[in-house]
Image (spheres, grey):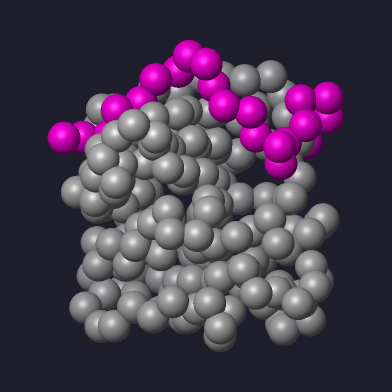
């Protein structure tokens, strides 16, 4: 069963403030919500996102432990042609991948010792390059963390199957919006134009 999305009763995202205008170089965000019926739906979502990625794309993943963020990254890498082991960077903070189309860095900031630790570790250059960055727990990076192109929030879906998930997505750039539109066109999401917002990392 494909992921089902709706555009009404949008969830509140505490990392963004409607009172702050978006910078002029970024379009107003597009927001979508939906449901992943199970692990197969997560795999299909990853495959769709893989078609959107271009050098320099930033994808941020948020959600409680055990919600499937790393599973989504694993399936994303497989869709991009990676056939090797996919390790979680929970303790190493980063796992780099040299793919045929671009380099991809998978970060997990759950165990950052302080908000600026990602910058102290020398990761900042990857966020200003042609490297695709996928970040789990971006909210742990503190203020000043670069805005994503696309951010996903994954949460449990009470009353549904154990592996069912709720999905919330926000696009903060033109290419992020193009990706969200592709998800919409594939039947995965309905998108809604929200007021001009700025991005603040939690």
Residue 95 in the figure: left or right of residue 29: left
| Residue at image location 29% in from the left, 48% down from the top | 163
| Residue at image location 24% in from the left, 51% down from the top | 39
Q: Can residue 25 be seen here?
A: no
Viewer-proximal residue, 103 or 152?
152
Q: Relative to 41, is 30 above or below?
A: above
Residue 197 in the figure: left or right of residue 51: right
Please say whether residue 32 is one of the residues in the magenta stretch.
no
Residue 191 in the figure: left or right of residue 194: left
Give x and y (percent) for residue 189: 36, 28
Q: Relative to 114, is 162 above or below?
A: above
Give the residues in magenta.
Answer: 1-24
Q: Which residue, as the protein is rendered here, is positioned at the far left? A: 1
User: What secondary structure predominates along the stretch shown in magenta?
Assistant: loop
Q: Relative to 145, is 89 above or below?
A: below
Q: Hey, which quadrant is residue 142 in on the image?
A: bottom right
Q: Hey, which quadrant is residue 197 in on the image?
A: top right
Give x and y (percent) for residue 118: 72, 74
Tell me how many marks there are: 0
| Residue at image location 72% in from the left, 84% down from the top | 121
Q: Which quadrant, please, contains the N terminus?
A: top left
Q: Which residue, as the protein is rendered here, is positioned at the far top? A: 8
Q: Can residue 197 be seen here?
A: yes
Please say whether residue 23 is one of the residues in the magenta stretch.
yes
Give x and y (percent) for residue 78: 25, 67
Give x and y (percent) for residue 178: 44, 36
| Residue at image location 52% in from the left, 16% down from the top | 9
């Amino acid at each position: 069963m494909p992921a089902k999305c709706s555009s009404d009763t949008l969830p509140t995202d505490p990392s963004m403030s409607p009172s702050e205008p978006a910078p002029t170089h970024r379009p107003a965000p597009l927001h979508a919500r939906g449901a992943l019926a199970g692990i197969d739906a997560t795999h299909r979502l990853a495959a769709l996102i893989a078609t959107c990625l271009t050098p320099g794309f930033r994808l941020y993943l948020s959600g409680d432990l055990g919600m499937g963020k790393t599973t989504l990254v694993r399936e994303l890498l497989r869709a991009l042609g990676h056939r090797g082991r996919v390790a979680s960077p929970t303790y190493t903070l980063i796992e780099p991948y040299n793919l045929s189309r671009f380099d991809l860095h998978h970060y997990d900031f759950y165990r950052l010792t302080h908000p600026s630790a990602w910058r102290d570790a020398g990761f900042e250059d990857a966020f200003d390059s042609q490297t695709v960055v996928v970040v789990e727990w971006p909210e742990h990076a503190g203020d000043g963390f670069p805005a994503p192109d696309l951010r996903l929030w994954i949460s449990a879906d009470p009353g549904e199957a154990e592996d069912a998930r709720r999905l919330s997505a926000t696009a903060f750039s033109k290419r992020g919006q193009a990706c969200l539109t592709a998800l919409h066109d594939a039947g995965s999401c309905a998108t809604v134009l929200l007021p001009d917002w700025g991005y603040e990392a939690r």
